[in-house]
Image: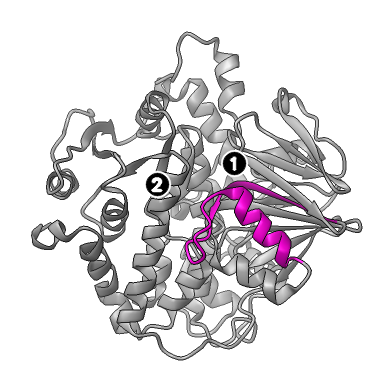
């Protein structure tokens, strides 16, 4: 499973560990695991970057901005990060103007704004570029929890091992922690719609800023989605990126395929089995039918249901564990195949079909849907050790830390806000950090304006997926008659 067996194991780990990562601190960040990283000043702060991390900086009138990652504005047709940062810099002096730009943006990024000894850190709408920060010791923010823990000398939190080994957690397929907790003492995660203020290490909510507006029509939602996916296609073209996507029978991957079918996509699907010897599944058949409508053929990767102990004893698996805070398991059966693919493709960009469930709603269809924002209902919706003191105390902390209350969400459905900010803002963002180990990665559906448009749909229309189906057919008419 080692990606480049010609390299010594330690050199391969150095290359992969915290790939595309960053640190924000008062002085250049130094640690053995950050050897070879570069530090650049951003006003009074420093940004320390993994050698492969993309970033742009700009400054004017005493304000210093840095954009880390990938960003575009599909509403205004800005497809290069330098142009996006210029728009943010032009607007930063006025909160309303600045947030209006931020709400339009798609991609996967962190934004640092520094002025007069105050540093603010924002994320893309879904929070898919993870940000962790210290709550004691030196004021640090970074892309990975272990980096922050290393720099402040934090140890594993006492709750972590009992929680991780609890039966309820072990039985969970999608694994993530309660609240904004991490495995480490004094290290927590920033979540969507909030900003981190350094050096106070204070979090402020900046969205929603007004009451939820009138209902959206299905036609308006479809048009917004088509425009967003057109923007994704243009971003790839302008930046010379070749899309890599996993294609299944699901709605979301089909929409990403429709947007990128003319961009020479590399398409894959994987089939799990105990012996990794099967190539047939409903997803594999659907991928073949969808891609085949446009003369394309997906790769089918037979993978193991789980890795053996020996299969997790390599640089990629160690980087996986350390980059994800250990709570996502010992390694990933499919990540090695994605890494091999990424190594062969110039300009490859893995597009993960995340964001669609934020738009359609998730907890609304669950038995333990949220009717009121309180510790008990958030714990029940999370549904892992929901009655335990550990789970409930972390959600109590989250509610206070990020100002998550019935009043603060201003008429939006708490099921939407909680799914968006907690599940996608924590599990979703760490899942993207996993993918970074293989190749640069981005999410397919990601803008605050897009999410808000779909959240204003009547719930029956949202759940019907009709806007997704119509947008897909508008972008890829031949899929109309493909039955999956």
Instruction: Give percent across and percent down for residue 172.
Output: 41, 53
Tell me the CA gap for discs 2 and 1.
23 Å
Q: Residue at x 49, y 54 (%)?
A: 428
Dot 1: within a 10 Å radius of its alpha carbon, few (fewer than 14), some, or many (20 or more) residues?
some
Residue at position x 38%, y 24% from top? 344
Residue 294 is covered by the magenta coloring: no
What is the number of the mark on residue 325?
A: 1
The part of the image, by quadrant, that contains residue 223 is bottom left
Is 82 inside the magenta-drawn segment? yes
Is residue 186 something that shows in the picture? no
Looking at the image, tell me whether mark 2 or mark 1 is earlier in sequence order: 1
Q: Residue at x 67, y 66 (%)?
A: 194
The residue sitting at 22% across, 28% down in the picture is 275
Q: Quadrant of the N terminus?
A: top left
Q: Residues within 10 Å of mark 2 (few under 14, many from 20)?
A: many
Q: Name the residue that disc number 2 marks.
A: 351
Residue 257 appears at what percent x and percent y? 28, 51
Which of the pair 231/127 is nearer the observer?
A: 231
Residue extent of the magenta highlight:
63-92
x and y percentages locating residue 324 in the rendered image: 56, 41
Q: Identify the colour scheme used.
A: one colour
């Amino acid at each position: 499973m080692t990606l480049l067996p010609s390299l010594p194991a330690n050199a391969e780990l150095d290359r992969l560990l915290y790939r595309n990562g960053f640190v924000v601190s008062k002085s250049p960040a130094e640690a053995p695991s950050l050897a070879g990283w570069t530090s650049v000043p951003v006003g009074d702060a420093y940004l320390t970057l993994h050698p492969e991390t993309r970033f742009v900086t700009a400054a004017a009138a005493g304000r210093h901005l840095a954009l880390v990652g990938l960003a575009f504005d599909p509403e205004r047709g800005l497809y290069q990060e330098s142009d996006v940062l210029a728009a943010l810099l032009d607007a930063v002096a006025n909160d309303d103007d600045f947030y209006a730009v931020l709400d339009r943006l798609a991609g996967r990024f962190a934004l640092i704004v520094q002025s007069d000894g105050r540093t603010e850190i924002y994320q893309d709408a879904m929070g898919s570029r993870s940000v962790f920060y210290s709550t004691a010791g030196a004021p640090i923010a970074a892309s990975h929890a272990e980096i922050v823990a290393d720099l402040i000398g934090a140890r594993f939190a006492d709750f972590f091992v009992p929680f991780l080994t609890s039966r309820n957690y072990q039985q969970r397929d999608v694994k993530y922690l309660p609240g904004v907790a991490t495995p480490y003492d004094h290290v927590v995660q920033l979540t969507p719609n909030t900003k981190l203020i350094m050096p106070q290490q204070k979090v402020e909510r900046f969205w929603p800023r007004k009451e939820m507006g009138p209902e959206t029509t299905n036609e308006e939602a479809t048009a917004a989605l088509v425009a967003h996916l057109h923007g994704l296609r243009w971003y790839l073209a302008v930046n010379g990126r070749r899309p890599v996507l996993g294609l299944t029978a699901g709605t979301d991957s089909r929409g990403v395929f429709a947007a990128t079918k003319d961009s020479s996509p590399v398409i894959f699907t994987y089939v799990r089995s105990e012996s990794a010897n099967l190539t047939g599944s409903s997803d594999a058949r659907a991928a073949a039918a969808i891609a085949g409508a446009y003369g394309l053929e997906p790769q089918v990767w037979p993978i193991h249901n789980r890795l053996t102990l020996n299969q997790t004893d390599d640089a990629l698996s160690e980087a996986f564990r350390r980059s994800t805070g250990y709570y996502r398991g010992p390694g990933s059966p499919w990540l090695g195949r994605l890494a091999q693919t990424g190594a062969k493709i110039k300009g490859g960009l893995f597009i993960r079909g995340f964001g669609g469930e934020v738009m359609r709603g998730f907890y609304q269809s669950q038995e333990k849907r949220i009717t009121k924002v309180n510790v008990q209902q958030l714990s029940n919706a999370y549904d892992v050790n929901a009655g335990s003191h550990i789970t409930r105390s972390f959600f109590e902390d989250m509610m206070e830390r990020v100002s998550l209350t019935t009043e603060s969400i201003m008429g939006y459905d708490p099921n939407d806000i909680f799914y968006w900010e907690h599940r996608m803002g924590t599990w979703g963002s760490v899942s993207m950090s996993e993918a970074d180990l293989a190749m640069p990665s981005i999410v397919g559906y990601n803008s605050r304006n897009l999410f808000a448009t779909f959240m204003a749909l009547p719930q029956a229309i949202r759940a019907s997926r009709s806007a997704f189906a119509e947008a897909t057919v508008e972008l890829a008419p031949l899929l109309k008659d493909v039955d999956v």
